Image (cartoon, helix red, strand yellow):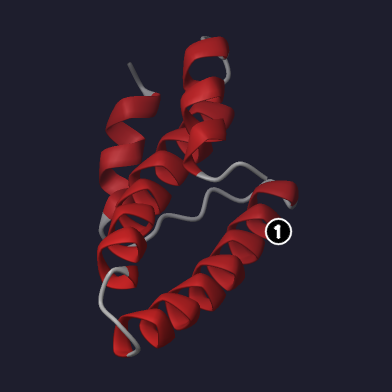
Amino acid sequence: VLGWITGIVFLVLEKENKFVRFHAAQSLAAFLPIFVIMIIVGMIPFIGWILSILISIFTLILWLFLMFKAFKGEKYKLPVVGDFAEQQSSK
């Protein structure tokens, strides 16, 4: 619900479960950059506001998709951040 912040919380709190750590790391690696991009793009008048809304919709869909995959017990790796998340979850 809190986006990338919950990724930090679960990475700090969960030490044993690699499945939870993977999804927390992937959440952090995916949604923190999207959040920063939305802030930067949102500063651009009109076009930036429209792009920010579109990015928000994309983010919601991605979040729901990843939540569904995690709920089903699947370890779904996103193309760019999945490898990073896998490395972080094994630490």
In the picture as drawn, the residue positioned furthest to the right comes out as 71
Circle 1 crowding by C-alpha within 10 Å: few under 14, some 14–19, many from 20: few
The amino acid type of the residue labelled 1 equals Phe
| Residue drawn at x 28%, y 71% as measured from the top left | 41
Residue 77, quarter of the rendered image: bottom left
Residue 85, quarter of the rendered image: top left
Of 31 and 21, the residue lying toward us:
31
Residue 30 rendering spot, x and y as whole percentages: 37, 52
- Judging from the image, what secondary structure is the residue with disc 1 in? helix
| Residue drawn at x 47%, y 41% as measured from the top left | 4
Of 77 and 49, the residue lying toward us:
49
Residue 62, quarter of the rendered image: bottom right
Task: Note whether 49 is above or below 40 in the view shown.
Answer: below
Of 33 and 11, the residue lying toward us:
33
The number of callouts visible is: 1
Look at the image and tell me in which quarter the C terminus lies. top left
| Residue drawn at x 54%, y 22% as measured from the top left | 9
Residue 35 rendering spot, x and y as whole percentages: 38, 54
Task: Note whether 21 is above or below 74 in the view shown.
Answer: above
Task: Note whether 74 is above or below 46 in the view shown.
Answer: above
Look at the image and tell me in which quarter the N terminus lies. top right
| Residue drawn at x 28%, y 31% as measured from the top left | 87
With 64 as the anchor, is 57 left or right in this view? Answer: left
Residue 74 rendering spot, x and y as whole percentages: 61, 51
Q: Which residue is mark 1?
A: 68
With 68 as the anchor, is 88 left or right in this view? Answer: left
Residue 21 rendering spot, x and y as whole percentages: 50, 27
